[in-house]
Image (cartoon, helix red, strand yellow):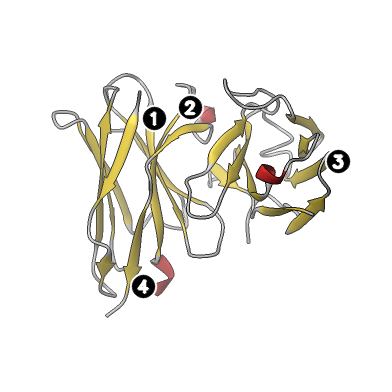
Amino acid sequence: QSALTQPASVSGSPGQSITISCTGTSSDVGGYNFVSWYQQHPGKAPKLMIYEVSNRPSGVSNRFSGSKSGNTASLTISGLQAEDEGDYYCSSYTSSSTLWVFGGGTKLTVL
Amino acid sequence: QVQLQESGPGLVKPSETLSLTCAVSGDSISSGYYWGWIRQPPGKGLEWIGTIYHSGSTYYNPSLKSRVTISVDTSKNQFSLKLNSVTAADTAVYYCARPRGKTYYDILAIDYWGQGTLVTVSS
């Protein structure tokens, strides 16, 4: 069982917006601003989409945005495109003995 | 451009030791970054295995700590993973990785990944 909880799947139609949640505790998501988000396509290494809750690396589309409220971080994808389909993972630093954790992953389907 | 390349056996027998090396190019392993290993069992999610600083300081996932050793070879600009007493549950794609920044807390903000290598544990 992952330390960070994500929905198993989300879906949306092209052009719509979707949000993926990542719920932790005050020891991780709620206590620190070191939440990252990754996109992974089949057979590929993950790609960093968001770091430190809401920062986008150079080259990542501004359709991707991150935020946090309490113990839950969120990744929002606006103007959904077919190429956005894939698996998404959150990660965070934690003050627990685990130190760093990933969420269980969310499969995004573009209808 | 930073590049990471994993190498090692693709098949390991149960109870034996899994050994992988990550060759780094385009950056010095002594440049102040943390260098890590992450794995992904087939069809499952990502799991942080451990991380090493060039000084040799190591950080391990408590669930694997008793079986894991990560080391660095600055002369070869590479770092290595050893996981002993493997079982079928250790079958996974293993990635080596480097975060985008040099902040200790942010080591899972990874922007450089190896291509990944599938290691199967089977007799």
Q: CA distance from mark 4 to mark 3?
A: 44 Å
Q: Quick one: SS at disc 2?
A: helix
Type of amino acid under label 1: Tyr
**Quadrant occupied by the C terminus of chain B:** bottom left
Residue with the mark numbered 1: B34
The residue under label 2 is B104
A64 relative position to B7: left or right: right
Q: Nearer the viewer, mark 1 or mark 3?
A: 3
Write the residue at 48% across / 49% down: A44
Q: CA distance from mark 1 to mark 3?
A: 38 Å
Residue beneath label 4, please?
B87
Residue kind at label 4, given as amino acid type: Thr
| 3D distance between C-alphas at marks 4 and 2 | 31 Å
| Residue at (68, 39) in percent of width and height | A27
Give the chain of mark 3. A
The spot of residue A78 in percent (x, y) is 80, 34
Do tags 4 and 2 sit on the same chain? yes
Q: CA distance from mark 1 to mark 4?
A: 28 Å
Discs 4/3, front: 3
> Which percent across, then down, holds residue B28?
26, 22
Q: Of label 4 and label 2, which has the lower sequence position?
A: 4
